[in-house]
Amino acid sequence: MGFYIFSSVFLLGVIAFLVFAIQRKQIDENIHNQMLLKSSQIASMIISQQMSAGHKELKSDFLEEFGDKNSQFTLFDIDKKPIYGNLHWEYIQEGFVVKDNIAYLLNQGAYGHLGVEWILIKTDFSQKIDDLIFWIVIVALVCLVFLMIFGFILGKMFLKPMRDGVVYLDHFIKDITHELNTPISALMMSTNSLKTGVSEVKISRILKACKRIHFLYSNLTFLFLGEIRESKENIDLSALLKNRLEMFEEHFREKQITLQLQTIEKLIIFADKEALNQMVDNLLSNAIKYNLIGGVICLTLTEKSIKIQNSGKPIPKELFSSLKQRYKRGNHHIQGYGIGLDIINKVTQNYDWDFSISIQNNLNTFEIVF
């Protein structure tokens, strides 16, 4: 922002200087032309008085019409003594000269008629220069204010994504801390209870907590600690899908979710196994997390696509695209951290698959077309 202000002031200063220089030159030219015209008119009047009226001496009354508060003139004889006017002889070269915003014009346009050898005109245009500077400063200040307002708005627009990213990251850290705290607390309670004896319930709780921590750890390392690996191999996606469903059996039972599974016998995909695990796990986790108690999940695997649909609050159409972005969430009332769909999107982009979100048969639908 400091550089923007400095560059704006510098640019305005250069422009103001150039405008002043151009306008000052124009003022000088206008003053010069006006003084030449005035000198020519005075000389014509003097010559006319001698030639046509027959005057032998200069009559001052006919020169009064050339009077001007900002422009004075004096007529001198051949000895440079004043005949008419109050100006003193200025030791300047013949022609047009400017000194300190005062212009002088000295010529011999009367050619000695009526004893007038020299015509000296003096014009003070300091007020014009002061007015020019005043308006340049006013316009420059207005432009500077406009640029500051524009820069402030532009800065807010450019910094908004950064601020949003900080906010999303802050929410993510809080959410992931909560997500880790739950299984860790369960592990501590279960391990402490082992002192009184081992049971299947306790072991089940420990396994569940370990699976949850492993799932979070896998997501975080996959997302933040490097790109998708390229250790591709032929993988039976149908078998992998059934294996991952077994990992989520307890979650299905907890929320009393009914699974409707339609899958082909075998589907070979040439890809990285860990990437497919992450993709399927996040599809299932998302469908369970945002589902209703006693809801339904429809999972369909064909030769061309995998589709998972879940009941629950419908996703607004305007969020279909943005939900694929990291930290974006559609329902802030349910604990989550907004990286699951980003991981799915990252995997599908790596393999040039099409990942879409939609509403079909009143179910939130997530479909990947191979």
Image: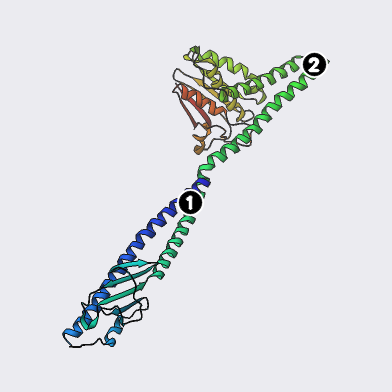
Numbered disc 1: secondary structure: helix
On the image, numbered disc 2 is attached to which residue?
A: 194
- 10 Å neighbourhood of mark 2: few (<14), some, or many (≥20)? few
301 up-or-down from 331: above or below: above
Q: Quadrant of residue 193?
A: top right
Q: Which mark is residue 150?
A: 1
**Amino acid at the residue labelled 2:** Leu
Q: Amino acid at mark 1?
A: Phe
Can you see residue 21? yes
**Tag count:** 2
Residue 197: name its quadrant: top right
| Left or right for 179, reference 93 | right
Badge 2 element: helix
Give above or below for 158 relative to 142.
above
Q: Is residue 146 left or right of residue 80?
A: right
* Closer-to-camera residue (171/256): 171
Q: Horizontal placement of 265 versus 178: left or right?
A: left
Q: Residue at x 72, y 24 (%)?
A: 184
On the question of residue 1 being in view, the answer is: no
Q: CA distance from mark 1 to mark 2?
A: 66 Å
**Residue drawn at x 76%, y 20% as measured from the top left:** 190
- Report the front residue among 365 and 258: 365
Viewer-side residue, 50 vs 244: 50
Residue 52 at x, y percent in the picture: 16, 86
Q: Is residue 323 above or below residue 370?
A: below
